[in-house]
Image: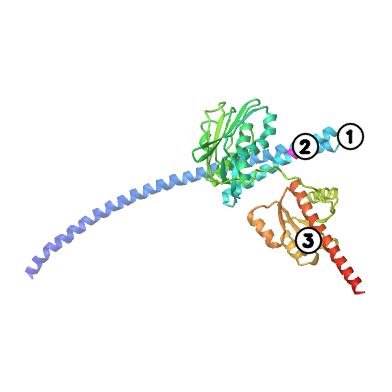
Amino acid sequence: MHRSSERMAPSKVTVSADLQRKPHALTRLNHELEQRVAELTRELEATTEALREALREADRRKDEFIAVLAHELRNPLAPIRTAVQLLRQGDLPEPHRGRARDIIERQVEHLVRLIDDLMDVSRITRGTITLVREPVSLSAVVAEAVDVARARVTAKQHELTVSLPDEDLVVDGDSTRMVQIVGNVLQNAVKFTEPGGRVALSLRRDDNEAVVTVADSGTGISAHLLPSVFELFVQSDHGQGGLGIGLALVRRLAELHQGRVEVVSEGPGCGTTVTLRLPVTHGTVDSPRSGPAEVTVSPTSLRVLVADDNHDAAAALQMHLRLLGHDVQVAHDGLEALAAGEAFMPELVLLDLGMPRLNGYDTAREMRRRPWGSEATLVALTGWGQPEDRRDTADAGFDLHLVKPVGELRLAQLLAERGAASARGTLLRRRAGERRNHGEAVRE
C-alpha cells in the first residue's frame, strides 16, 4: 500500500500543476477573446456608421434629384403654357402664332429627351439595355452629333471647329447610341461655355483606338467634383441646370461598347476636355447614315379606333387623324373599345395599355377573337417601352408597339403602311369579285 502511494505521488503532482496552469490559460484566452470582440465591435460600429452615412448621402441626393427634376420639368412647361395662352387669342398675327407653335414643339422635344435619358439610366442600371451592333462610321456619327447641336451652337454664337481624319474610322457598335454618346458630350460643352466661346471636336486614330475629343473654353470643373463627375445626379456648381445624368450615361454607354471616357479640367474658368476612346474594327459600313425618310401620306381613308383613358390625349389624336382624312372614333376604356369595334369595324386600333375596366392587353386578346379584330392592325400606344413590355404586347396579339409620344413621322409611316395594306386588300377583293362575276357569265 505504501509503495502504491509512492508510485502515485508524481501523478498527483502533475495533475495539480495542470490544474494550476489551466485557470491562467483560460484567463489569457478570455482576455484575448475580449480584445477580439472589442476590435470586431469597433469595426462593426465603423461599418455601420459608414453605411448610415452612405444612406444619408443617397437620401440627400435623392431629395436633390427630385427637386432638380421638378425644376427641369417646370422649365419647358412654363413656355408651353405661355404659348398656349397666346394661341387662344383669336387675333394673334400669323408670325406670332407660328413662333408659339415652334416654342411648344421645341419644349416638348426637350421633355421627351429628358424622359428618354431617365429611361436609359434605368435600363443601364438594371442591365436591360440592348445594343444593335453593326459597323459604324465615326465620321458619320460626329456629323450627326454636330447637326443635332448646331442650333444651340448658333444661338450661343460659339466658334465650333471639327477635325476629322482622312481615313474612315469604323467601330462595332449601336449607331443610335454612338450618336447619343458624342452628342451628349458636345451639347454639354455648348451648355457650359459662355456665349462667344470656343468648342473643338476632333476624331483621330491612336494605334487600335479611335479617339473622340471635345474641348471647350467654358466654365471648367472644380477639383472636388472631378472624381465624381461620372456619377448619377452629380451637378456642376455653375447653376446651368440639368439632371446630372448626361456624363453618367456617356460613361456607361461607352463601357458597353468596350470603350472608356475621361474628363480633364484645370479648374473653374479653364474649360473642360472630354476624351472618348473606342476600339477600332476592321468592318466596313454598307451605306452612310441617312437622314429621316420622307413619307408620302396615303390617300386611303382608314377607320381608326383610338382607346385611351386620358381624354385629352385621345381627343388630340382624334383631331389630328381626322385632319389627315381618316374616320376616327374614341373609347376611354377596354369595354368601350370592344363595343365601339363591333359597330365601327376599325381597320386600325390604337390602344393604351393602362385603361380601366379592361386593360389594353386583355382588350387586344378579346379583339383577336372577333372576326373584325382578327383583320385589324392593333397598335399598343403606351408610355412603357422596356423589352419585356414589347414581348408582353406581342404575346397579347398586338402588331406594333409604339412608345408615347409618337412622332409625326412615325405616325405618318404607320398610316401609310396600313393604308397601302387596306388598298391592296380592296384591290384583291375587287379582282376576286370580278373573277367570280366572269365565271358566272361563262356558266350562263
Closer to the eye: label 1 or 3: 3
| Residue identified by numbered label 3 | 376
Furthest residue toward left? 3
Furthest residue toward front? 442
Q: Residues within 10 Å of mark 2 (few under 14, many from 20)?
A: some
Question: What is the span of residues highlighted in magenta in the rendered image?
Answer: 101-106
- Establish if 102 lies above or below 392: above
Indicate the position of residue 383 as horizontal and vertical percent values.
Answer: 70, 51
Question: Cα distance, mark 1 to mark 2?
Answer: 18 Å
Per the image, label 2 sits on a secondary structure element best described as helix
Per the image, label 3 sits on a secondary structure element best described as loop
| Residue identified by numbered label 1 | 91
| Residue identified by numbered label 2 | 102
The amino acid beneath tag 1 is: Asp
Furthest residue toward bottom? 443
Quarter of the rendering containing residue 388: bottom right
Q: Quadrant of the N terminus?
A: bottom left
